[in-house]
Image (spheres, helix red, strand yellow):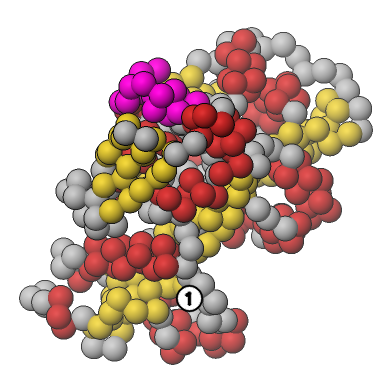
Amino acid sequence: MNTSLAQFDGPRLMRREEVFASDQLFRICFEMPEADNEKELLANYVPPRRGGTYVMSHQGKPVSQIGIFHDQFKMYDGTIQVGSIGGVCTHPDYRKHGLASRLMEHCTQQLVDEGARLMLISGDAGVYLRLGNVFQGKYMYFSIKPEQESQRRAAPADLIVRRATPADALICSELYQAEPVHFVRQKSDFVYALNDPMSHRYVHVDQWIVERSGQVMAYLFLGVLWGSPLNSGIRHVGEYAGSRVALVDALNLIVATGNLKELTWPVAWQDRELIQLLQDSGYSGNRTHLDGSTHRIIDFPGLMKDLRVVLQARLDKNLLRGLRFEQSGPLLGGLGDDRYTIRRGSERLELDGAEMTRLVMGSVDNDSDSTPASGALAEVISALFPLPSFLPGLNYH
């Protein structure tokens, strides 16, 4: 189709009358069954206070769109403002016009304007990488299969696993809040997820509770990887919380009870206890990034302001004195024109946004103990970075 960018309307927020057309576009692009619930969609639509669906339209109909969402994330004693990108799609007849890139640029700036510091993207398509986003974090990926389980020690006699129910929402919320790194949620988020697991099918389809001596010790939410059928017998850990010992002890029961052929488990690099327990149980893991996820720091000074309490806990006063974080240049470009800088006195480290995101958030691409700085600034960077990796879990968008 010979259509110039000027002939499209947008980027702009989706209008109420476009709700059904937007839903149809999503279903076409992600090969989902058509829906005929236009009245229900319109009745349930509430204009967002922040975030929402942004579109490019042609001849009065959305042909490309992106959803943006806001969350808060607890990292030890700091609270980070997080913006997420999801539901990115362009109608097959309108691809290769740069519509998704134009929307990405607009929505990224919109997230910054609305207070987000870190942008998470539920995807790793080339357009995200070309715009300077990078693969998310550092993880150990473990693969657990039934034939491995036959060689494991039996689970303790007082340990049981069972399916989670909506009645478990409170205990799941309590276990999750006790994690040192977690999204800020309400109990109602767990009630919703446990009442309608298929609403988060790529995060969790099977929800397991692990009990020992009648006490809930942990939970494990398993999902289906994109493109895999539900009956494949292959599951992916989307979220977990609670006792690491109980989780590892329960693995053989979960694999057997769930009739699983394989369970893949990405474990964040800083969860050393779980990694060690899995390795001690004979499972081998591969170091890699989080599958199907990319991210980028979009407000570097704001991110470090959010984490000021963490900086104060990790750095001596003399190292903290005069420490500054700066950002300049285009927010997205993918060409290295953006500059992110860490300064302390006369010392400075300047990188583009992609490289600074890898340094601060961690990356298997530069998985080493060396820092790109020297002197006191190297001491600062070693004490602060990389920050913990994490699973989006129920906050997957």
Residue nearer the viewer, 235 or 268: 268
Amino acid carrying label 1: it is: Ala
Q: In the image, is residue 253 above or below residue 184? A: above
- Residue at disc 1, secondary structure: loop
Q: Is residue 126 magenta?
A: no
Q: Residue at x 37, y 35 (%)?
A: 345
The answer to whether residue 388 shows anywhere in this view is: no
- Which residue is at 47% across, 68% downward? 114
Left or right, residue 249 beside residue 85? right
In the image: residue 341, left or right of residue 234: left
Residue span colored magenta:
367-383
Please state the horizontal and vertical placement of residue 340, each as a whole percent of the image. Answer: 31, 45
Image location (x, y in percent) of residue 337: 19, 50
Residue in front for this viewpoint, 331 or 347: 347
* Residue 259, placed above or below residue 336: above
x and y, in percent, of residue 116 in the image: 47, 59
